[in-house]
Structures are given as structure tokens and as C-alpha cells.
Image (cartoon, rainbow, N blue to C red):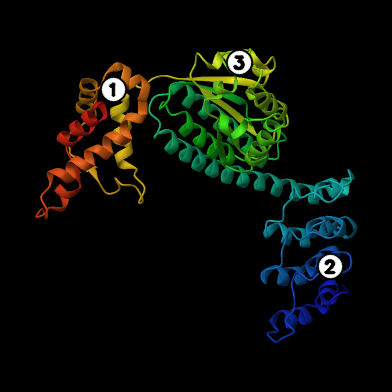
Amino acid sequence: MAQTPLHVSAGYNNVGIVKFLLDSQGPERVELEAKNMYGETPLHMASKNGCNEAAQLLLANGASVEAKANNGMTPLHLAVWHSLRAEDCSTVATLLEYNADCSAEDNEGMTPLNHLSQGPGNDKLRELLLWHREEQRKRKAIEACSETKAKMDELEDALSNIVGLNELKLQLRKWAKGMLLDERRRALGLKVGPRKPPHMAFLGNPGTGKTMVARILGRLLFMVGILPTDKVTEVQRTDLVGEFVGHTGPKTRRKIKEAEGGILFVDEAYRLIPMQKADDKDYGLEALEEIMSFMDGGKVVVIFAGYSEPMKRVISSNEGFCRRVTKFFHFDDFSSIDLANILQLKINIQAEDSLLYGFKLHPSCTVDVVSSLIERETSEKQRKEMNGGIVDPMLVNARENLDLRLSFDCLDTDELLTITLEDLQAGVRSLSR
């Protein structure tokens, strides 16, 4: 578009007209960010002509100090050019007071400092820009530090809901801290290479928290900017493998496409590889190979999960498996004390739509007491087969026992919502039956 009256008046430092236009409240109210044919705003015009008073008025009225012209230059770039010719730093100083970015790059990758020649006459201008650049870096580092701490606190909150798995939690902390420190390095203007999250294998029995950890990992990788989404697409054999020749490839690719930008969580991955290799009608290996072909592209993180022993079939079935899957985590079976801790956590973090929302445990239901109850009322085989899967049905059964116990005449609000040790005992015994 053509230059507006504000462009012209700002470019000639006609402060009276600039003020009149800025104060105008009529239907033709001036646009501060209007651009001419070169993509320059009125502030660009004031800056490149050293019109400091006009620049001050524009900035005081909210003009964008980081607006970019068609060539990518900000007002600070143009003010530096004027200062080099006129040996007047006043407009540069004004823009810096409004925190103009000394590290902003134009279309050729040049910052305002890059436009300075090495001549002796530029010392004052160079000193001014260098001082402000350092101050801006410090501010960005402080902001990044605050954001980093908030993100680490968010991660710690998520990890606090995981019982056991200390090795895995340590690894998650290492990844998070490294990724967040990279954020701070970039905030300070340092150039560091991008991180790629590894593909993983989660090995362990059902109920040991593999799916929950995958969801937390999805949130973590999204939170630190490694993945563009936090979605975790959970699939099993039936989601990937077709019944006829030619069906498996497209079916698997659809699921990979659905998971793009996040995590593909392949549960019971060992079911992709039949125990009898002579079964030529099984297409599980084709699905696995299809997934493998996408793993080097970096568009999806794949986690294979399953029992430790059968997963050896998957690992040995493809020569490239261990080259692509570089992190293996073992999810141990939960002890009775672990299960008691999980139960305490679950009852305290119920969502509003949960059957157990609003309920609490009686003070006598300590971790040690509940642990002894679980140890006494369940077998080792049952705990190994169910692991954390014991807790939800145990609590649901306990609530049903509470309902059975209470009289319709009960008006004690505390009693109406308190699950006792007697209820938990009934709940765990119902599992055995």
C-alpha cells in the first residue's frame, strides 16, 4: 500500500502532525502498524531517518518495536544504519529503552550489530548495543530459568504418582533436565543441536504401569518441545495386522499416521511374532517391519511393551530392532507395600467423574496396615498376575461394602464418605472369590 500520513509525518519528524494523528479518535483512526510497499511501518520510517521524537510518540502509543519490513529488518536495524551516517545514537537508545531485540535477524541473517563496520567511529554505538544485548540475554536466561523450574515441578508432580520404577524415573529426569537446559542455552543465544527422543521397550508384567508411564512420557516430550503433540496412540496386534494378504501394510501405516507427532505405544508387542515360525498365514512380522521402516524418520516415537520373556522373540525377529530401539526399561512386579502406596495415591487423586470421587480412607488405613492386609489376603501368584490391577477393583469393592454397611438413616457426612479397613478387607477378599 502507499504511505499513510503517519508514515510521512513520522519520517520527517513532524511531531505536531504525528501527535494529532495519534490523538484522532474518529472513524479514520490511524493504524500504527500500517505498512508501505516496502513493508515498513511508521516506526520504521522514524527510525531510518533518526526522527527520535516521532519514534518516542509512536512507541508510547503501542507501536511494535519488533515489526519487520519485507527485508526482515526491524526499526532497530534501520536506526543503526542512520546512526552510522549521522553519528547520533538517540533513536537507537530510544528503541533499546523499549527493549528492541539486539539479536533480531533480517532476511540475510544479519543482526543490528552485524551492520556495524569495524571503524573507530562506531565505538559508542557498539558499546550501547553490546550492553543491551547482554542485558537481554540475562533477562531471557532468568525467564527461561523460571519456566524450566515450572516444567520440572510439573514433571515431578507426574512422577510422584508413579510408585517404584526408580531407574526409569531417574532417566526421565535426565532427559527432561537436558532438554530444558537446551532451552536455556538457546535463550542465551547459544546454538545447540536438536535432541531426538529414543525409541524404547517397556518390559514387565501387566499392571506394572507401562501404559501410564508412556502417557507421562508423551506429556514430558511435548512439554519440553521435543514432540509437537502429547498424544499417545495405543495399539495392539488387532489394530495393526490384517486377515488377508495386502491388508496389514495399509492398516499399520494408518495407525502410524494417526500417531505422528507423538508416541506409538505397541502393547503386547510379542503377539506380532507367532511362536510357531512355520505359520505362513500370520502377518505380524509384516506389521513390525512396517513400523521399523518409519522409526528412522523422527516423526513418531515408538514404545514396544510386553512380558520380558516373550519380547525376546520381537527383539530377535528383526536385525535392526536393537539399532533403533536403544532404551530398555524393566518394570518390576509390585510388592505389597508398593500396592498399598498406589492405593493411597489413587484414593487421593480421583477425577470428578470417578465412582470414588469424594471418598477417603479412615486414618487407621495406613500404608503399613494396608500392605499387611494385601499380603495376607492375596497370593503371590495373584499379585504377580495383577500387580497394580489389584487396586481399582479393590477400592470399588470396598466402596460397595461401605454402602452395604451403612444405614439409610446415616446423616454423618464423614461416615458416609469414609472407607474403613473393614471395607478394604471385604474389597480384597472379593477379588479372591
Q: Residues within 10 Å of mark 2 (few under 14, many from 20)?
A: many
Residue type (three-letter) at the residue carrying disc 3: Ile
Instruction: Measure the alpha-carbon separation of dots 3 and 2.
Output: 65 Å
Q: Quadrant of residue 265?
A: top right
For label 3, the SS is helix
171 vs 406, left or right, is right
Please tell me whether mark 1 sits on a helix, a strand or a loop: helix
Circle 3/circle 2 CB separation < 8 Å: no
The quarter in which the N terminus is drawn is bottom right
- 198 vs 293, nearest the viewer: 293
Q: Position of residue 204 (x, y in %)?
A: 46, 20
Give me the disc on residue 253.
none
What SS does tag 2 mark? helix
Q: Give percent across and percent down for residue 317.
A: 64, 15
For residue 315, which numbered disc appears in the image? 3
Q: Is residue 267 above or below residue 75?
A: above
Counting every numbered tag in the picture gives 3
The residue that disc 1 covers is 336
Crowding near the residue tagged with mark 1, few <14, some 14–19, many ≥20 C-alpha atoms within 10 Å: many
Front-most of residues 318 and 125: 318
Identity, as a three-letter code, of the amino acid under mark 2 = Met
Which residue is at the far bottom?
26
Q: Residue at x 84, y 59 (%)?
A: 78
Image spot of residue 320 (x, y percent): 69, 17
The quadrant where residue 194 appears: top right
Local packing at callout 3 (Cα closer than 10 Å; few below 14, some 14-19, many 20+) is some
Point out the frontmost of discs 1 and 3.
Answer: 3
The residue pinned by badge 2 equals: 45
Q: Amino acid at mark 1?
A: Ser
